[in-house]
Amino acid sequence: MSVTVVLQQMGVITILVAIGMYLYKKGVVDQTVSPKLSMIVMDICNPALILASMLSGNVTATHKDLLFAMLLGAALYAGLVLIGFVFPLVIRVEKDSRRFYNLMTVYTNVGFIGIPVARAILPENAILYVIVCNVIYSLLFYTHGVVVLSNGKEKMSLGRIFSSGTVMAVLSLVVFWFDLDLPPILSNSFSYIGNATVFLSMTLLGVNIARADIADGIKNLRVWIYIVFRMILFPAVMFFVLRACGCGQITVMSLCLMAAMPIGNLPLIQAEKTGEDTALLSSAIAITTVVSVVSITVLMTLFTMLW
């Protein structure tokens, strides 16, 4: 993967995000249309893209690669759970807000943004690491995440783990493991649906940026500390540690990209459902999403140059 390819693909993503901002300003995609399109992306297009990637025949990874990806993914999220507990204490977050910074640290946007970005700028084999991160993300959020958000008052929600995205991700791993083939009518359908993911998701990202009030996030010093530590320093340290351990380029770049994602939407959605004050999460998601367009481009370019 060359620097030119990274810059070109991130340039394409920037254009798609700008289109989303334009569509919002013109009223084409408003606050009524946006949630419906988000549902289409999360429940239909993203899952289809995952399975289509496995059925394309371009993923040449081995069973050993998948097991290694699962091991590294588990280690990554185990580390994030620990950091999520310690980080709010280190930066002296108020007690009532610590759980939010905990969730912000662990649950970044590896699905809605991570899948299409990885698909756009990384080789086909990278999808293994992306899928593994998304499966672990779902398993953790509806167990660890809901408990942290409720300060231990809410029980784990095992039923909600099995969303269409998680089910399709697991199914994709099964397809890969057993080298299964689907009839052309199904595989082609998944391919066509999945091809819409990058455009729709990046356009919706632009819509979210355009309508967000990022003023609170800009004024919050701790959010900027979070950005520097979680979205820049953490992926950078991962890059050098994984490379020093002898991991291959696809492995390193995939996991570092997942580590560089902005804050995910699930903590916000869950907080809204339980009647929590979501001002911090909303502003933090907005500002980290805006910053990520630049930070991911810079990080992935530097990582490619240093390889």
Image (spheres, rainbow, N blue to C red):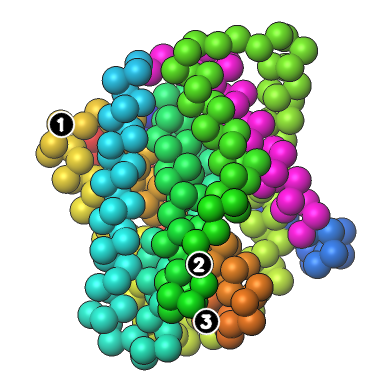
Q: Which residues are magenta?
A: 35-61
Relative placement, left or right, of 24 versus 82 is: right
Pointer 1 local density, CA inside 10 Å: few below 14, some 14–19, many at least 20: few
Q: Which residue is mark 2?
A: 155
Locate residue 122: give its quadrant.
top left
Q: In front here: 87 or 145?
A: 145
Say whether disc 1 or disc 3 marks the residue closer to the N-terminus.
1
Say whether disc 3 or disc 2 marks the residue closer to the N-terminus.
2
Q: Nearer the viewer, mark 3 or mark 2?
A: 2
The alpha-carbon separation of the residues under discs 3 and 2 comes to 24 Å
Q: Which residue is mark 1?
A: 246
Residue at 75% x, 46% y is 40
Relative placement, left or right, of 221 versus 33 is: left
Say whether disc 2 or disc 1 marks the residue closer to the N-terminus.
2
Identify which amino acid the numbered label 1 is placed on: Gly
Q: Secondary structure at mark 3?
A: helix
Specify the quadrant that holds the N terminus: top left
In the rendered image, residue 68, in percent from the top left (x then y), is placed at 28, 30
Q: Secondary structure at mark 1?
A: loop
Pointer 2 local density, CA inside 10 Å: few below 14, some 14–19, many at least 20: few
Let me know if residue 26 appears in the view: no
In the rendered image, residue 106, in percent from the top left (x then y), is placed at 39, 61
Specify the quadrant that holds the C terminus: top left
Numbered mark located on residue 280 in the image: 3
Identify which amino acid the numbered label 2 is placed on: Lys
Q: Residue furthest left?
A: 244
